[in-house]
Image (cartoon, helix red, strand yellow):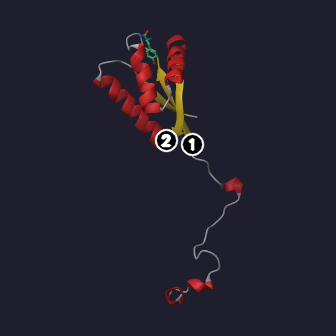
Amino acid sequence: MADKDKNHESLTPGTGTQTLVRPDSETKQPTLYKVIILNDDFTPRDFVVHVLVRFFSKDESDANRLMLEVHHQGAGLAGTFTYEVAETKTYQVNNYARQHQFPLKCVMEAE
Ligand code: TYC
């Protein structure tokens, strides 16, 4: 208590910290980015499934479903993230595929 008085904290009710609150209309939501995985003719299906499990935390059956969707439709949504997370995942997947000499690619786009 003596310490608190020294810091004048006892003059501020509550926690001793202040929170500034904006009206909802002024609160900005961060822009989200889609990470889209693209089809190609060479990357093995199993490798795509493995990538979806490893980098996008899919379970095996969701990963398999998404892989087939991409295989048949050309592209598919791997996930939606903040800018930095989307950028990191895109970079990691493209590097990982290149290291294994597969042409698999992800791209990101603003939602
Ligand atoms: N089209 C590939 C094949 O036939 C499989 C594949 C699926 C590749 C999804 C990339 O994002 C992809 N081996």
Mark drawn on residue 31: 1
Ligand 1 quadrant in view: top left
Where is residue 12? Give x, y as percent. 62, 81
Residue at the disc numbered 2: 83
Please tell me whether residue 33 is drawn above or below residue 15 in the rendered image. above
Q: Is residue 74 visible?
A: no
Which quarter of the picture shows residue 5?
Answer: bottom right
Please tell me whether residue 84 is drawn above or below residue 1 in the rendered image. above
Label 2 CA crowd tier, 10 Å (few <14, some 14–19, many 20+): some
The kind of secondary structure element at disc 1 is loop
Label 1 CA crowd tier, 10 Å (few <14, some 14–19, many 20+): few
Task: Name which residue type carries label 2.
Answer: Tyr
The kind of secondary structure element at disc 2 is helix
Q: CA–CA distance between discs 2 and 1?
A: 7 Å
Observer-nearest residue: 94 or 49? 49
Q: Residue at x 53, y 32 (%)?
A: 79
Where is residue 40? Give x, y as percent. 42, 13
Answer left or right for 6 relative to 25.
Answer: left
Observer-nearest residue: 82 or 4? 4
Task: Give the position of the C terminus as an image quadrant.
Answer: top right
Which mark is first along the chain, 1 or 2? Answer: 1
Mark drawn on residue 44: none
